[in-house]
Image (cartoon, grey):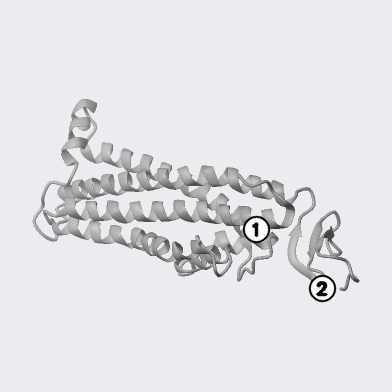
Amino acid sequence: MTFGSHPPGWYPDPWTAGGFRWWDGIQWTPAAQPPGGTIRDLVADLERWGRIARYAVLAAALGYVVTMWASMVVMSEFSSMFGFWIGDPVDEPGEAFFDSFAAMAGPSTTFQVANLVSNLGWAVTLAGGVLFIVWFHKAAKLAVVLGLPARFTPGWAIGGFLIPVANFFLPYMSAVDMVPPDSPVRRTMPWWWAAWLAMAFFPWVMFGFVLWGSPFEWWVLGVYLVIVGLAAEGARRVVEGVVDTHRRIAEGWVGVTPR
């Protein structure tokens, strides 16, 4: 569809009633402002959710570490109760901590207390993850509006976190598409995603140490803490970088006041 010799700018979208689309002076582009909202509104919303997401990933990381720690104690107690040891049983890191609470609780056991702590940790992790995914969807949606080419729709961007096998690569590809090819944010994404994948697989190593009765669980837990920290810091940098990139692109199009 042509638009004559109009200069570059935002004009009523010929395909979407009430919306606006960017005309580059030659043709219509993918950049569009949906009905009921402007680029400025969408950027402000992404910034607001970006602040939430930065704290959410840190909370999720802390919850995940607590969950894994408590889960190691639960597995150790379970193995002790049923004699399910591959190697020689040893005290788990933090087992005395849960024992002290079990003693105060009377009939409660270390297994029950550690299991409760594990469930609380999972709840924190889940809440943080949901908040991050909400931001992720908004960022993927705004990237499309800003005209950045995306290989997947915003729906697939978040659905990729839930689909087996696809969750190894689809969210990463969607994140990469949120910024231009020359964006420095792309340099952060590989090690963020590598840490994310390592965080998902490393618990199997930890639980293997528990079942084997190895005395090195503290070291294993320490390594895992570093991996989770890298994943959380990488996610925080990705959030900041994507938000900043989208704001800068929008500034060039609609004159959003820089901060």
Q: Amino acid at mark 1?
A: Ile
Position of 202 compared to 31: left or right?
left
Q: Which residue is mark 2?
A: 26
User: Which one is nearer the viewer's eye here, 140 or 203?
Assistant: 140
Disc 2 element:
loop
**In this image, 128 relative to 107: left or right?**
right
Q: Position of residue 168 (x, y in %)?
A: 44, 67
Q: x, y (%) of residue 31?
A: 73, 63
Quick one: label 2 or label 1, which is nearer the N terminus?
Answer: 2
Q: Is residue 112 above or below residue 213?
A: above
Q: Report the residue at 59% width, 43% height from top.
A: 48
Which residue appears at 55% of the width and 65% of the height? 174
Q: Residue furthest right?
A: 4
The quarter of the image holding the N terminus is bottom right
Can you identify the residue that label 1 sits on?
249
Please identify the quarter of the rendering in which residue 208 is found: bottom left
Quadrant showing the C terminus? top right
Residue at the image position 46 percent from the left and 53 percent from the top: 237
Q: Foreground: 54 or 122? A: 54
> SS of the residue at dot 1?
helix
Q: Is residue 147 above or below residue 91?
A: below
Q: Amino acid at mark 2?
A: Ile
Q: Is residue 76 left or right of residue 54?
A: left
Residue at point 63%, 47% (across, down): 258
